């Protein structure tokens, strides 16, 4: 392993090694060189290299956790030969791990490392030469694990509520959580109050809450907080709330009107009309002046109506009726005014009878009182309807 001495087998430190190390250290000090000086170990000691499955491996933990290492020394002989610490080499540096406890014939060394990632390069334990006797002492990396509570990823949620005017109709509305026009999730309200989407909102994304369905007869009148952009970490734990208000539409309505036209004009008053359906009277009115007059009746969807003239001045004949039968069809006819115009023309007056008095006088000797005479009336119209009587 790069930068790590090869300690594939225990090595005994001889007295000549100790002597040579001391001489070299003294010489370096005398020459003024600044170099680290190893602490000399006692004569007749050995180093046992670390073994274990995790040697050379990298351990990674989540944010908010730390790494716990457990090393063991076995077959060490007497407890008096157990070292107070062992040397462990990590990628981040070399540390002396102190003895934690002894159980049975096992010495335990534990180390907590406040980092989320580390690579174990190896290590060693120093002890007496008797460690080489059979069975030889062993120094192992026993286990390692991530401890502590991970820091949860930042999160945020979205919710929506329906408000109706008048209140009481908040259930049955369908909403969509959208991202750039693409539907992410939908929900349907079950009543008043906020309803939450399950989708985990993503950092940097702009969302819209859109009403996509609901009962008929309502108009959306306001939408508040229904578009937002998520910005972590500032929005961690945020609940984005959208409130959409709908106002109930007025019931559809339509009315009926009638006007009387007379020829000659000027006699439009005192005409009686009825609004009927299937021969039954729904409403009636009497005209008071020229122009349209409105029936006091709420027209019903799908019903066919007729406007009928049922009374009026004498001497007039109805000559036309326009728009006086119709069928109501909501919602298309919402606000419609159905208008009927009935025209009456004045009748010609009856001719009056007159008289012409004819008196014949006879004079002379030979006059005959019983003689018959013929008379003829001349002038305009004298050939029509004249009757001569003896009165």
Image (cartoon, rainbow, N blue to C red):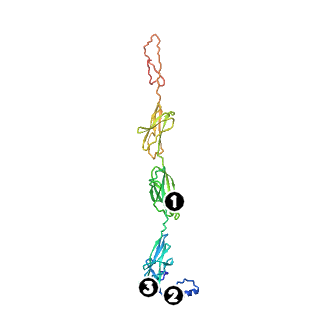
- 178 versus 102 height, above or below: above
Q: Quadrant of the C terminus?
A: top left
Q: Position of residue 280 (x, y in %)?
A: 41, 38
Q: Is residue 273 visible?
A: yes
Residue 79 % position (x, y): 45, 81
Point out the tag, 1 or 2, that comes first from the N-terminus: 2
Q: Does residue 181 appear in the picture of this structure?
A: no
List the single residue furthest toward the bottom.
Answer: 16
Q: In this figure, what is the number of numbered marks?
A: 3
**Other-residue count near label 3 (Cα within 10 Å), few / some / many at <14 / 14–19 / ≥20:** many
Q: Which mark is residue 18?
A: 2
What's the distance in space between the residues labelled 2 and 3, CA to CA? 20 Å
Per the image, label 1 sits on a secondary structure element best described as strand
Q: Disc 3 marks which residue?
A: 132
Local crowd size for mark 1, using a 10 Å CA cut-off: few (<14), some (14–19), many (≥20): some
- Mark 1 highlights which residue? 228
Of labels 3 and 1, the one closer to you: 3
Q: Nearer the viewer, residue 241 or 301?
A: 241
Q: Is residue 328 above or below residue 208?
A: above
Task: Identify the element where label 2 is drawn.
Answer: helix
């Amino acid at each position: 392993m790069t930068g790590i001495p090869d300690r594939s087998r225990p090595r005994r430190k001889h007295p000549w090694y100790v002597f040579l190390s001391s001489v070299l250290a003294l010489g370096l000090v005398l020459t003024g060189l600044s170099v680290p000086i190893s602490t000399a170990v006692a004569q007749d000691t050995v180093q046992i290299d670390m073994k274990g499955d995790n040697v050379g491996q990298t351990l990674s933990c989540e944010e908010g956790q730390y790494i716990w290492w457990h090393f063991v020394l076995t077959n060490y002989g007497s407890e008096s030969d157990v070292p107070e610490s062992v040397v462990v080499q990590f990628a981040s540096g070399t540390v002396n791990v102190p003895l934690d406890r002894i159980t049975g014939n096992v010495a335990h060394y534990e180390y907590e490392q406040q980092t989320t990632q580390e690579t174990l390069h190896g290590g060693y334990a120093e002890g007496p030469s008797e460690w080489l006797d059979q069975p030889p002492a062993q120094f192992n990396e026993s286990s390692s694990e991530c401890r502590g509570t991970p820091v949860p990823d930042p999160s945020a949620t979205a919710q929506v509520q329906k408000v109706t005017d008048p209140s009481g109709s908040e259930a049955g509305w369908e909403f969509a959580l959208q991202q750039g026009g693409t539907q992410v999730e939908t929900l349907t309200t079950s009543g008043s109050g906020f309803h939450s989407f399950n989708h985990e909102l993503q950092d940097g994304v702009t969302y819209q809450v859109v009403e996509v369905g609901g009962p008929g007869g309502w108009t959306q009148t306001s939408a508040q907080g229904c578009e937002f952009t998520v910005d972590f970490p500032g929005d961690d734990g945020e609940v984005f709330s959208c409130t959409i208000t709908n106002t109930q539409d007025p019931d559809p309505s339509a009315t009926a009107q009638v006007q009387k036209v007379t020829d000659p004009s000027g006699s439009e008053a005192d005409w009686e009309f009825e609004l009927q359906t299937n021969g039954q009277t729904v409403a009636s009115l009497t005209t008071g002046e020229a122009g349209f007059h409105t029936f006091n009746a709420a027209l019903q969807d799908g019903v066919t109506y007729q406007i009928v003239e049922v009374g009026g001045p004498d001497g007039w004949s109805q000559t036309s009726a326009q728009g006086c039968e119709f069928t109501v069809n909501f919602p298309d006819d919402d606000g419609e005014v159905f208008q009927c115009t009935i025209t009456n023309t004045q009748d010609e007056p009856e001719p009056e009878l007159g008289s012409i008095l004819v008196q014949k006088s006879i004079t002379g000797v030979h006059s005959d009182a019983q003689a018959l005479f013929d008379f003829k009336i001349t002038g305009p119209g004298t050939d029509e309807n004249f009757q001569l009587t003896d009165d």
